[in-house]
Image (tube, grey):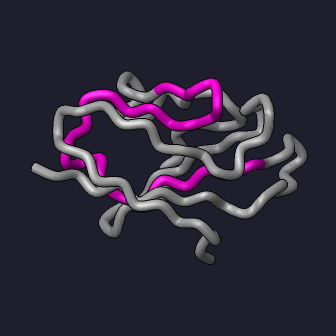
Amino acid sequence: SSGVDDDHMFISSGKNVRLPCNNALHDCKSTVWNYSNRYSAAVELIALGIKKKDTERHERLSLGSDCSLNINNITTEDYGSYTCQQWRKDGQKLRDDARVYLHVLY
């Protein structure tokens, strides 16, 4: 299902990018960021406000104070769909997804 306000961002390889989370709650403790592209299954990058350590790009990721996803030193492999979701610890989804499509220029 598609979010109501999907965003498209275009960024040059080697730059840093901030992907907005347009459905965030006040403290990011319910924020989940997932990544996918047409060649791979979805990967969870941030789980309930905590950065996952087992992802390839984990060193380049950080969560902004507004729950945005910051990615440093963009590579062409970073292109794809990033989805910000809000979940309760009991597994109940709190809001509709906010999706950002990242297009990497090289």
Q: Residue at x 70, y 40 (%)?
A: 31
Q: Residue at x 40, y 61 (%)?
A: 8
Instruction: Judge whether 12 appears above or below 65 on screen.
Output: below
Counting from the top left corner in percent of width and height, residue 99 is at 54, 60
Instruction: Judge whether 14 appears above or below 41 on screen.
Output: above
The quarter of the picture where the N terminus appears is bottom right
Q: Residue at x 35, y 58 (%)?
A: 80
Q: Which residues are magenta?
A: 62-86
Instruction: Judge whether 3 appears above or below 52 on screen.
Output: below
The one nearer the camera, 31 or 103, is 103
Q: Residue at x 79, y 58 (%)?
A: 95
Picture quarter containing residue 14?
top left
Q: In the drawing, does residue 47 fall left or right of residue 51? A: right
The one nearer the camera, 3 or 75, is 3
**Residue found farthest to the bottom:** 1
The one nearer the camera, 19 or 34, is 19
81 falls in the magenta region: yes
Picture quarter containing residue 25?
top right
Q: In the drawing, does residue 96 fall left or right of residue 60? A: right
Counting from the top left corner in percent of width and height, residue 59 is at 38, 22
95 falls in the magenta region: no
Counting from the top left corner in percent of width and height, residue 52 is at 54, 31
So how many labels did they put on this image?
A: 0
